[in-house]
Image (cartoon, helix red, strand yellow):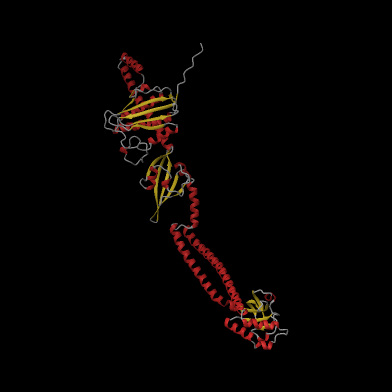
Amino acid sequence: MSRTTTIRPRFATRTLLLHLATIALVVALCTGVYLAVAVQQLRAEAESTALGIARTLAEDPQVRAEVALISAANDAPDAESLRDGDLQRIAMDVSARTGALFVVITDEDGIRLAHPISSRIGEVVSTPFEEVLEGNEVVDWQTGTLGESARAKVPVRDDAGTPVGEISVGFERTGVFDDLPPLLAVIGLTALGALALAGLAFLLLRRRWERLTLGVQPEELVALVQNQTAVLNGVDDGVLAVDAAGIVRVSNDAADRMLGLDAPVGRPFADLGLPASVLETVTGDRARSSAVVDDRVLYLDSRPVVRDGRALGDVLIVRDRTDLIALAERLETVRTMTAALRVQRHEFANRMHVAAGLIDAERVDDARAFLGELVERGSVAFPVTGLALLGDPFLHSFLGAKGVEAGERGVALRIADETQLIGSVAAPEDVAAVLGNLVDNAVTAAVAGERSPRWVEVAVLGDGDALVVTVSDSGAGLGDVDPLSPRPSAEDAGAAVHGHGIGLPLAREIARRSGGELWIIDPGGAQHGAVFAARLSGAVSPVVPAQKENS
């Protein structure tokens, strides 16, 4: 049995029991509160009814007159006559009509003038009566000769308003709570219904939970979150997940760092201010692309997430290719220089073969003349017009090598007459990356163009410690294309001129990193192709003039 199939029954059982226990506790608490309120309400109703009956009877003129007359007499009340008297008859009639346990009438001494048990008439009541004879109404639960009851005691007043007796009305406990058993039955049925409804609600919620979580249970979710955190923050690649509504749900530290994001989780992906190439990759317009974000060249790979046929969103994998591309640019520079050396070595070998052939033919004078000519001409010349204008050995060799490569493709590389550089190159790697990219793009544009002859012209100028270069070509120009916006490598390779990839954006970032810039001077026209310029601050070491010796 798999781990998932083991966890789910356990989880379902434990959750169901916990859910039902919680509901049972809540129902029991509510039932107890409701029952307490119901009991209190029944008690209050009984007390209110007793008080109303006692007040009504105490206001009866006949009762007031009879009680006042008996209280005013000096002799004790005649119990025998009271048993068949009007007060007893009135009390019994009221008790029969209202269902009261008792209706008792007393005089000012607490002697019963009417009582349900006639033999008790003439005796003093068993419960306190002094407070009532002081003119107060008393409502309480008391235990008397007839047992515990809810009773109300109201004073009987004479015509002058002086208390001369009391009316005591009581309802038996069992009579008060006659409605309690049916009420308990209703409460019990309601509680059972609540438990059944809770069980049904749990099953429905569980089905919805499993549908929302695609069948993943809470224990598994905890493990997934822990594993996700460990994995996402343990890799160098950036991972950014966007749901079907375009909201960022996951973004690891690497993605935040490379894309320059600050707390993107929970925010719409379109509102993060990312380049269009990144947005197009995530929205599905491109599966893979490259983008320049700040000074980083990023490779983007978007993959849709589908589970059980349901599209959940997209996951964007971000890889930093800045160092790789920079290394590739440096290797390209080395390769260019190597190719130039190879051409020079081949040409030098040819010259040596000529000299050796003259010597073998015993034409010593001709061989000596040939070698002398070589000494005067120097090393093999690069096929670059105006290369002598460059006094810096690095630029001389680098552009000479680029001229060899351009010549192999049928393009003439030349140095502009306005070239002037005083000093030497201090940042050869940045210069090679930026200038090499511009020259390579210009050669590609010249080859793709229809003008003849094909040429590329480079101008190099010094401005303090800054190096300013311009590169123009004989190509067709830029047209409506913006070469400074990175394009995916999967586009038509035939149109990949002037940096329709990530070369120019990277070169611009290299220039900006040193405080410089790369821009377009002229997109091209009828006379020539595009003209690019770049300024690299701090790329030139000015020549320090030698101090004159003291005479």
Quadrant in the rendering for residue 325: top left
| Residue farthest top in this picture | 551
Up/down of 297 relative to 534, above or below: below
| Residue farthest right in this picture | 74
Residue under the point 27% across and 28% down: 453
Q: Nearer the viewer, residue 161 or 192?
A: 161
Quadrant in the rendering for residue 64: bottom right
Residue under the point 48% across and 50% down: 228
Instruction: Estimate the x, y position of residue 45 in percent, counting from the top left.
Output: 58, 74
Q: Nearer the viewer, residue 169 or 456?
A: 169
Q: Nearer the viewer, residue 298 or 361?
A: 298
Total numbered circles: 0
Q: Nearer the viewer, residue 185 or 4?
A: 185
Horizontally, residue 448 falls left or right of residue 17, namely left
Please indicate, yes or no, whether residue 7 appears anywhere in the rendered image: yes
Instruction: Estimate the x, y position of residue 363 in percent, counting from the top left.
Output: 30, 15
Quadrant in the rendering for residue 211: bottom left
| Residue farthest front in this picture | 160
Horizontally, residue 164 falls left or right of residue 507, namely right
Please indicate, yes or no, whether residue 145 appears anywhere in the rendered image: no
Instruction: Estimate the x, y position of residue 545 in percent, counting from the top left.
Output: 46, 18
Instruction: Estimate the x, y position of residue 304 in percent, counting from the top left.
Output: 39, 50
